[in-house]
Image: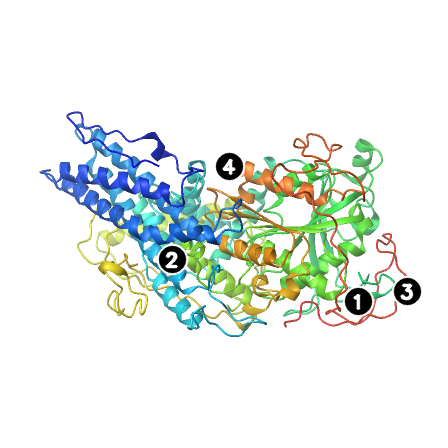
Amino acid sequence: MPTPTVSKAGAGGSQALPLLLTTLSLPQAPPGTEARALLVALAALAEDNAAFFGRSATAAGRRVGAACVALGEQAQALGPALAPLGRAMASFDLDAATPGNGYRSLAQAVAACAAHAVHKSRYVAAHRRSPFFRAGHNAAELEAYGAALTQLRALLYLAQRLLAQHPPGCLFPELPSAETPATTTANGASAGPGLTELMLREYSTMHKGCFYGRCLGFQFTPSIRPFLQTIAISLVSFGENYRPDDLGLGVAAGSLLTSGKFAVDPELRGAEFERITQNLDVHFWKSFWNLTETQLLASVAGLASSPVRVSRALTVPPEPLELPLAADPTRCITITPPVAHTGPGPVHLRLLSAELREGQDSKALLALAGPEGAAGLGLGLGLGLGLERWRRGRPAPRSPALLLHFHGGGFVAQTSRSHEPYLRSWAHALGAPVLSVDYALAPEAPFPRALEECFYAYCWALRHAALLGWTGQRVCLAGDSAGGNLCLAVALRAAAAGVRAPDAVLAAYPVTLVQAAPSPSRLLALLDPLLPLGVLCQCLSAYAGTVPARCPPPGRAAEGAVALGGAPGAPPERALLLRASAWLGALLEGAGRRHGSTATPPGAAQPSASESVPEVPPAGPRSTGRSHTYQDPGPPPGSDPPGTASMGALEYPDGFEPLRSRYPAAPVPLDLSPLGRNPYMSPLLAPDSMLCTLPPLHIVACALDPMLDDAVMLARRLRALGRPVTLRVVPDLPHGFLSLSQLCRETREATALCTRILQDMLAPPPAPGSPPVGPTAPRRHRARRRASTPGAPPAPGAAPRRASAPAVSHPREPKPAPPTPPPATPQGEGRGKRVGARS
C-alpha cells in the first residue's frame, strides 16, 4: 500500500488526506498496515498543527500546540512498537480463512484510535484560522486521544512481552492442569506465575479514565457508541448513589437526577468510571446489571421483541431422574438433583415456543408453572388456556428439535428474562421450543452449583421431552459469555456420566479459562467499558468461590431481580419521590455548607460505599470550573518509582512510562482458586481425552472482546485433536452483542449469524446415501429448512453416543424405559453420587 501524503496547510488552513485512510479493513493489506498508514498521517498532521499553534499568544492555543506535539510523539513511537506484533499475529489465527486473535485486536484498536485522532487533527487544521474555533474544546479532544495512544503504546509493549514469553502458538502462559503440572516456556524458563503477577500488578496501576470519557467506545462501530455512553453515564450515576443496603429502584431514580453532570463533562465521567472500576466489589456490579431484570425494563424490552405463544416460568422440584446409558440403552443411571453449597433445591427454567405444541398445555407442565408461568400462554400477554385453544384449535405437533439455553451475566447476574428478546426471535426462526435455565448465581452459589443445575436441567429435558413439545430427536445447547462456559461444561459432564450427549453446541464469546491469566486480547480490558479488568477478575473470583456472599438486608430478596421499590410492595412512584426528596435535601445541605454551616444534621444519610473510598488528590493545581482533560499526576503515594518495582522485569523501552491512575491499585487476585484448574470450570484446561468427547462446537467471538483468546485457543486445541469445530469472529462489536440484537444493523447481522448456525445445528442430518444438499438462500418460511451457509461447513450430524464410564452414579440394571417417556411416566428413584463434584 503506498504511503499516504499530507499537504502542508496553506492560506486556507486546509489539508488533504487520502480516502483510504478512513478505511480500516483492507483485505489484501498485510497485518498492521492500516494502523501504520494512519500513524504516518497522524504524525504529519500533528507536526503541522504544532507548528501553527506554537506561535499562539493565548494559553488555549498553546495548549492545543502541546497536545499536537504529544500526539506526534506517540504516532512516531507506535509504529515500531506495532511491528513485532504485525509480523507474528497471523501465526496465532485458527486458519487462514479465520483471522482473529488478541494481537490482531490490539493492532485494530491502535488503528481505530489513530483514525479518530487523524479525523480530529484534520478538523483542527481546517478550522484553526476561524474566529469561531474553540481552542479549549479542541485541546481537550486532542489531549484525550493523546492519552489513549499513550496507554495503547503501553499495551503494545506488554503484548511484546507476552509474545516473547508464551509458548509458540499459545496465547496464554502454560498453566497447570491435570496433564501439565509444570509451568515452563519453550526455552525451559518459568513463565506462568511470575509473568502473570508482574503484568497484572502493572496493569492495575495504569490510568484508564481516558478510555471512558471522550474516547469511550472508539474501537467499536460508530452506531453503538451512543449506547455505550448511556451505559457509562448510568453506571457512574448509579455508583454515586449506590449503597449496599439499598438495592431498589430508588437508587436508579436518584441516579437519573444526578446523571446530567456526567453527560456534559466527559473527563468527570471518565475519572468516576475509573474510580468505580478500581474500588467497588462484585455486589455493586451484580446490583447494576440486575437493573435489566426489573419489571419496567423487561416490559419495555418485551414490546420490541417478537411475540410468542408460550412463555412460561417453570420450577422443577429436586427429584432423582433415571436416564438410559448412551452406550447401552437397556441400562439406566440415576441423576441426583443439585446439592452443592445450599443443599437440594429446585431448578428454575423458562420455556419459550412460537407455537403451542402438544404437551405444553398438559396438566403435568402446568403444575410446574408459577403464577407468571401459568399466565404465559398466548402472545405472552396472559391469555388463558381455554382462550388459546379457542384461537388455535388443536396444538401443533411436537417439534423434532429442542434448544437448551444458558444465559450470560458473568456468573453473578441476570436471568433468562433479560435475554428473552433474542430468545423469542430464536423460537420463531428455529420453529423449535427454547428452554432457558435460570441457574443459581455467584457469589451466593459459586462453582459447581450453576453447573449442577444446568446439567440437571439438561437431564430433566431428556427425561420429560413430551412435556416440552419435543419428540426427543435432536437437542442442542447454546449460551453466551458465562453461559457458553456452562454449555461446554454440561457437554463434558454428559460424556462423563454416560448419558446422551447434545448433538451440537453454540458458544457465543465464551469464557473458557477462569484464571487471572494475561493474554493479548485480555489486555483490551483496559479500554473496554463493558468488561474492565477489575470487573472481569471479580466475576471470575466470585464463581471460583473466593468472594464472600453478602447477606441481604431484612425484608430483601436474597438474589434475582431488583425490587421495584424501596421496600417490599412499595410503589415505584414512592421510591422516586423519596429519592428526589433526598437529592433536594442534599442540595440544600451543600448550599448551607457553602455559607459556613458544616455540621451534619442528625439522621443525615451516611456516605455511600463508593463515596467512602479514599481518593488520592492529583498533583498540580486544581481547577475550580469544569474538569480538564486528565494529566498524569504521577504514581500513587507509597508506590514504587516508575519503571522499577512497579514493572519489575517488565521494563519499558526508551524510557517510556505509561500514565498512572490517581486511585489506589485495584486488588487483582492472582490465584483465584485451585478450582480454576478444574476442567468443568476452565474447559480450556481439560485434558485431550475429555475434549475429544465434545460434540460439534460452533463458536462466535468478537474481534475486540477481551475474551477473544479464550475462544481462539479452545478452537485451536479442538482442531489439533481433529474434532469438528468452527469459529466466526465478528468485527467492531462489544462483548454481549446478543443482548443488543435490536440496537443497530451490525448487532442484527451478528445475531442473524448465530440464528443461521442454530438452524444448521437443529436441522435433521441427511439420510445415509442421500446426495449432499447445496447452499440455499436464507429460510423465509418455517416449512423451508435452510440446508447450509455459503462458505461454512455442512451441518454436522448427530454426535455418537458416548460409552464413557458414568461419573455421577453407578449404573445398575433398570426397568426398561423408553428414551422419551410420556408425561405421566413417574420419575426414577434411586441413590447416586453428586452431580458436578469437584475433581
Rounded to the nearest angstrom, the CA distance separating label 3 from label 1 is: 12 Å
- Residue at 33% over, 39% down: 116
Residue 39's x, y, as percent?
Answer: 29, 42
Q: In the image, is 244 to the left or to the right of 117?
A: right
- Residue at 52% over, 64% down: 542
Residue type highlighted by circle 1: Thr
* Marking on residue 746: 4
Q: Which residue is mark 3?
A: 815
Helix, strand or loop status at disc 2: helix
* Marking on residue 159: 2
Q: Is residue 655 above or below residue 753?
A: below
Count the numbered circles shown: 4
Question: Of discs 1 and 2, which sits in the foreground?
Answer: 2
Residue type highlighted by circle 2: Ala
Question: Of discs 2 and 3, which sits in the foreground?
Answer: 2
Q: Earlier in the sequence, mark 4 or mark 3?
A: 4
Rounded to the nearest angstrom, the CA distance separating label 4 from label 2 is: 29 Å
Residue 226's x, y, as percent?
Answer: 42, 38
Rounded to the nearest angstrom, the CA distance separating label 4 from label 3 is: 53 Å
Assess whether mark 2 and mark 4 are in contact (beta carbons under 8 angstroms): no
* Marking on residue 334: 1
